[in-house]
Image (spheres, grey):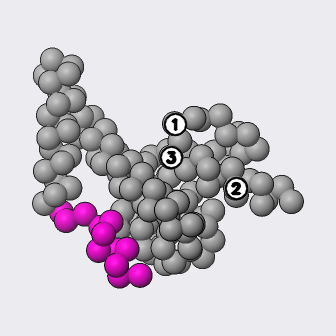
């Protein structure tokens, strides 16, 4: 388990550098309009989190799946407090979506039976959870 945390937990300086450069380019793309610096920063943080999630999901796919323990470690590395409190895959994914991505989880809404967000990073996992839930 520590191996996963070491691979996925960003060094604060690396995270800060990546986010600051991304926020700069976001500001540049909108012509450095004043007053939107915080929005640029927050969007860049979410982009960084999505990058980490993609790396985590890719690694899990290559390894043949993910465990609850791996999800707990990953959620903790994203800054989710008490990630070890959650003991179900669905609960951890939901918390990552809500806390780290500021995204309303599909399987906590009316859309829970048919995910129609093609860009959702958790689409495959959500559909598996829904299929299990419907059995």
Name the residue at 73% across, 40% down. Answer: 114
The number of discs equals 3
Q: Residue lying farthest right?
A: 135
Distance from the alpha carbon under mark 2 to that under mark 1 = 16 Å
Question: Can you give x and y, in whole percent of width and height, for residue 71 in the image?
Answer: 50, 69
Residue placed under numbered mark 3 in the picture: 121
Question: Can you give x and y, in whole percent of width and height, for residue 121 in the image?
Answer: 50, 46
Q: Which image quarter holds the C terminus?
A: bottom right
Name the residue at 45% across, 56% down. Answer: 58
Query: Residue 69: within the magenta?
Result: no
Q: Secondary structure at mark 3?
A: loop
Image quarter for residue 4?
bottom left
Highlighted range, magenta: 1-12
Whether residue 67 is visible to the viewer of this picture, yes or no, is: yes
Name the residue at 33% across, 66% down. Answer: 8
Q: Which image quarter holds the N terminus?
A: bottom left
State if disc 2 and disc 3 touch (CB < 8 Å): no
Tell me the tag on residue 128: 2
Distance from the alpha carbon under mark 3 to that under mark 2 = 13 Å
Whether residue 100 is visible to the viewer of this picture, yes or no, is: no
Question: Can you give x and y, in whole percent of width and height, for residue 11 in the image?
Answer: 19, 65
Q: Secondary structure at mark 1?
A: loop
Q: Residue lying farthest bottom?
A: 2
Residue placed under numbered mark 1 in the picture: 119
The foreground one among 60 and 134 is 60
Tell me the tag on residue 98: none
Q: Secondary structure at mark 2?
A: helix
Of the residues under marks 3 and 2, which one precedes in the sequence?
3
Q: Is residue 126 above or below residue 86?
A: above
State if disc 3 and disc 1 touch (CB < 8 Å): yes
Query: Residue 7: within the magenta?
Result: yes
């Amino acid at each position: 388990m520590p191996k996963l945390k070491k691979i996925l937990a960003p060094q604060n300086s690396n995270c800060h550098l990546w986010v600051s450069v991304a926020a700069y380019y976001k500001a540049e793309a909108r012509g450095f309009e004043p007053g939107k610096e915080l929005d640029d920063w927050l969007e860049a943080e979410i982009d960084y989190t999505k990058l980490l999630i993609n790396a985590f999901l890719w690694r899990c796919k290559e390894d043949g799946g993910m465990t609850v323990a791996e999800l707990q470690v990953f959620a903790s590395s994203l800054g989710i407090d008490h990630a070890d409190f959650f003991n179900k895959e669905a609960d951890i994914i939901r918390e990552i979506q809500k806390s780290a991505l500021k995204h309303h989880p599909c399987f906590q809404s009316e859309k829970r039976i048919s995910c129609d967000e093609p860009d959702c990073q958790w689409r495959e996992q959500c559909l598996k959870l829904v299929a299990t839930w419907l059995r």
